[in-house]
Image: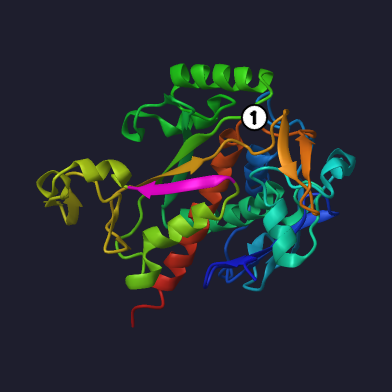
Amino acid sequence: MGNSFGEIFRITTFGESHGPAIGVTVDGCPAGLAIDETAIQKELARRRPGQSRITTQRKEDDTCRILSGVFEGKSTGTPIGILIENQDQRSKDYSHIADSFRPSHADYTYQVKYGTRDYRGGGRSSARETAARVAAGAIARMLLQTQGITIGAYVSKVGEIAAPEYLSLDLSRTDDNIVRCPHPETAEKMIALIDQVRLDRDTIGGVITCVIRNTPVGLGEPVFDKLHAQLGKAMLSINAVKGFEYGSGFDGVTLRGSQHNDEFYTEGERVRTRTNHSGGIQGGISNGEDIYFNVAFKPVATIMQDQQSVNKEGKEVTVSGKGRHDPCVVPRAVPIVEAMACLVLADFLLLAKTNKI
């Protein structure tokens, strides 16, 4: 029913934005993996609401409880259950749209598909669900770290303000500022823009760039389960995402093949490429170079302005923006992008172990 993700390292999330709790079950995690609950909590803190003036002011501690699958600090090989209680719901903020459809939300499509919907914060369609993914992604990251694989994302664009390409940046500085851009000068401009948009009672979109390093050669499956195809599916499943590109992406169409091809050379015992237009993936399989991709996020659909819409009877109505919402989603979406990338890589890492005799 679309609530699970992954083949071997498989997660299933549950819960709604204004229900008692949200959570996730992680199945397929190998036994004996050291589980650092503090690391899980750190990732949840990076995603949680209310962390700065440029995010929603909903206050959630997002404290996680591990219910199963971990004993004496290590995974047991059985399903890991994690629960995150909701604490600061304001369901009354949504009573005005109980029978109306907010522009560019899932209200209308959910109503038609299911014949009913939880209008409180969007219910299951709310980005609140992504906290469960972040918790699961933190466990996947622990598995990847045993193989030296690192994954880092950052805000590379807000509106028209763009940071330099990742090769010139120190990604360890991503969390040095509230917008999560590791280029300080660009970060200041991004923050100023988001502040102005918020004062205008509006929203704005942006781009997150993700970089995966030290990936072994051979992750990914031919034809339908290519590594970049699964990364694309993972990113496009995140709320508000409108686009995904890896490697040279859409800019690659401006090059000729003689410019775009990544020539091979030997560095010690390792085969390398002189350029990396392929984005670390060739034939759907990792080649050992950096995997890098961009994820585009639309402006948040809830704006603090009146908009025209219709209700369940098809009558025209005016919908007023209420509640607590992000003026720009990308600062809080950085750990979500990282988490989904971790889940994809962990799944393929385990799958690779089944491909060889």
Which residue is drawn at the image coordinates 35% and 51% (left, top)?
214
Q: Nearer the viewer, residue 254 or 337?
A: 254
Q: Nearer the viewer, residue 149 or 226?
A: 226
For disc 1, the marked residue is 327
Is 242 on the left-hand or right-hand side of 310? left
Q: Position of residue 323 (x, y in %)?
A: 80, 34
Farthest residue to the front: give it: 315
The answer to whether residue 204 shows anywhere in this view is: yes
- Quarter of the image for residue 48 reads top right
Is 330 on the left-hand or right-hand side of 132? left
For badge 1, the amino acid type reads: Pro
Q: Is-magenta flag for residue 142?
A: no
- Quarter of the image for residue 200 reads top right
The region drawn magenta spans: 240-246
Q: Position of residue 290 (x, y in %)?
A: 32, 47
Is 357 on the left-hand or right-hand side of 202? left
Mark 1 residue element: loop
Which residue is drawn at the image coordinates 81% and 54% (left, top)?
313
